[in-house]
């Protein structure tokens, strides 16, 4: 009599694995926004005189329509000097600050020229005008559009890559997760150097700024499951 050997049904486990890797996508853009910080400082013994001089600038600044002004602030502080370990009140210091932005170099130059003219007409060493480095930057609109384009490029690339990989290794590879990290790796390009403007330097405000390309980059992390 033959003995029947038991039949063992062993589950066949399909071999699967996960791929986790990074890839960079870069878009080259031309900065489209000129920016500069403007500070007007006035020192007077009388508080009202400080306010009178500040208003000459502020009235003009509030009417400026060709440029965008942000982060406006005004501070008024007492000023002291020290002699023989004694504090002596000498007056007040008023500081008016703005960030000026424009996509048009001509408009920004015109705005700075008019500020310089106001300063020169006051004819007082107590009034100081400082215009910081004028630099090219990438506007939020251009930067956001560039990131959108790069995200779409990354999604299309990983979709094509997963299909190609599936055909190559004869497994079904699908994207399970994408993490995207965004960076703007461009250098800030200065159009002109910082200076305290006077009538002798007025012509410097008409120097044509030079733009330079900047790189906007995303670094997605892709996770693929192949089984």
Image (cartoon, grey):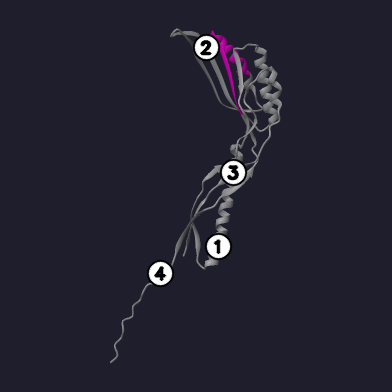
In this view of the protein, which residue sits in the foreground, 154 or 126?
126
Per the image, the residue denoted by label 3 is 216
Question: CB of mark 1 within 8 Å of CB of mark 2?
Answer: no
Residue 18 percent across, percent down from the top left: 46, 60
Per the image, the residue denoted by label 1 is 163
Q: Residues within 10 Å of mark 2 (few under 14, many from 20)?
A: some
Q: Residues within 10 Å of mark 4 (few under 14, many from 20)?
A: few
Residue at the (62%, 15%) spot, across then down: 56
Q: Residues within 10 Å of mark 3 (few under 14, many from 20)?
A: many
Residue 190 percent across, percent down from the top left: 63, 32
Residue at the (33%, 78%) spot, across then down: 8
Residue at the (55%, 66%) spot, across then down: 168
Give residue 145's mark: none
Q: How much space separates mark 3 and mark 4, taking CA atoms?
A: 45 Å
Q: If you read the primary sequence from the N terminus, does the residue marked by circle 1 or circle 4 appear first? A: 4
Is residue 60 rendered to the left or right of residue 219?
right
Q: How much space separates mark 2 and mark 3, taking CA atoms?
A: 45 Å
Q: If you read the primary sequence from the N terminus, does the residue marked by circle 4 or circle 2 appear first? A: 4
Residue pushed farthest left?
1
State which region is magenta. Answer: 36-59
Q: Residues within 10 Å of mark 1 (few under 14, many from 20)?
A: some
Per the image, the residue denoted by label 2 is 92
Per the image, the residue denoted by label 4 is 13
Above or below: residue 165 compared with residue 37: below
Residue 179 percent across, percent down from the top left: 49, 50
Residue 200 percent across, percent down from the top left: 70, 18
- Quadrant location of the N terminus? bottom left
């Amino acid at each position: 009599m033959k003995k029947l050997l038991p039949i063992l049904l062993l589950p066949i486990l399909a071999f699967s694995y996960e791929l986790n890797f990074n890839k960079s996508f870069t878009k080259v853009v031309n900065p489209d926004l000129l920016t500069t910080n403007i500070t007007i400082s006035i020192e007077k013994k009388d508080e009202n005189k400080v306010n009178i001089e500040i208003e000459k600038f502020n009235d003009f600044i509030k009417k400026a329509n060709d440029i965008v002004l942000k982060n406006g602030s005004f501070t008024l502080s007492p000023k002291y000097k020290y002699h023989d370990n004694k504090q002596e009140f000498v007056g007040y210091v008023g500081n008016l600050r703005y960030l000026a932005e424009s996509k048009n170099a001509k408009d920004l130059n015109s705005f700075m020229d008019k500020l310089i003219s106001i300063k020169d007409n006051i004819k007082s060493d107590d009034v100081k005008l400082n215009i910081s480095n004028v630099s090219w930057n990438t506007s939020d609109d251009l930067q956001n559009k560039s990131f959108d384009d790069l995200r779409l490029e990354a999604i299309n690339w990983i979709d094509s890559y997963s299909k190609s990989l599936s055909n190559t290794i004869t497994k079904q590879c699908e994207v399970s997760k994408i993490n995207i990290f965004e960076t703007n790796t461009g250098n800030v390009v200065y159009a002109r150097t910082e200076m305290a403007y006077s009538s002798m330097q007025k012509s410097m405000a008409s120097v044509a700024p030079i733009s330079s390309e900047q790189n906007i980059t995303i670094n997605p992390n892709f996770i693929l499951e192949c089984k």
